[in-house]
Image (cartoon, rainbow, N blue to C red):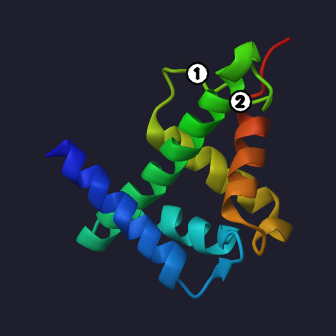
Amino acid sequence: MRFQSYTLALLAAFGVLVCGSQTTPTGINTQAFYDLCKDNRVGSASAQDASRVCLAYIAGAIDTIRTVDTSRGNTFRSGICVPSSSKPNELSLVFLNWVDKNPQSLHTPAVSSLMKSLRDGYPCKS
């Protein structure tokens, strides 16, 4: 059942990326992703779907960061060190707060803003 939920969330995310009006050549923009993640605070069924898409997108980004960072023995190339104890909602709040402080990023690709927010929120210790 959990697998189905994540599969549906990823398919929904793909639908947003392909069909959404707020896309860039590289995918969804920060404004659209911000709105999606902000919507998960409402509590309706559509808000639950938005929450799943938001958290699935963030989880995918973190998985990619960890994979790239640990490939070929190079660790922490991204400068992002999210503790394994971090909760998904915590990560979305880091992104939302970062965008609130950086409104100039609203028209840039969401993945770029997400990476910057995670780098600021979870920098690697030297």
Coordinates of residue 120 in the picture (x, y in percent): 79, 38
User: Does the residue at mark 1 contact the one at mark 2 (Cβ under 8 Å)?
Assistant: yes
Q: What residue appears at the point 77 percent right and 37 percent down from the top-left corner?
A: 119
Number of marks: 2
The amino acid beneath tag 1 is: Pro
Please determine whether, in this image, residue 29 is positioned above or below residue 81: below
37 to the left or right of 104 = left
Q: Residues within 10 Å of mark 1 (few under 14, many from 20)?
A: few
Please determine whether, in this image, residue 2 is positioned above or below residue 42: above
Coordinates of residue 63 in the picture (x, y in percent): 54, 35
The amino acid beneath tag 2 is: Tyr
Q: Nearer the viewer, residue 32 or 47?
A: 32
> Is residue 42 something one can see in this rendering?
no
Label 2: state its secondary structure: loop
User: In the orientation shown, which residue stands out farthest toward the front?
Assistant: 72
Q: Which residue is mark 1?
A: 83
Image quarter hosting the C terminus: top right
Query: Mark 1 or 2 closer to N-term?
Result: 1
Q: What residue appears at the point 80 percent right and 26 percent down from the top-left corner?
A: 77
Q: Which residue is mark 2?
A: 122
Q: What residue appears at the point 55 percent right and 71 percent down from the top-left corner?
A: 35
Q: Residues within 10 Å of mark 2 (few under 14, many from 20)?
A: some
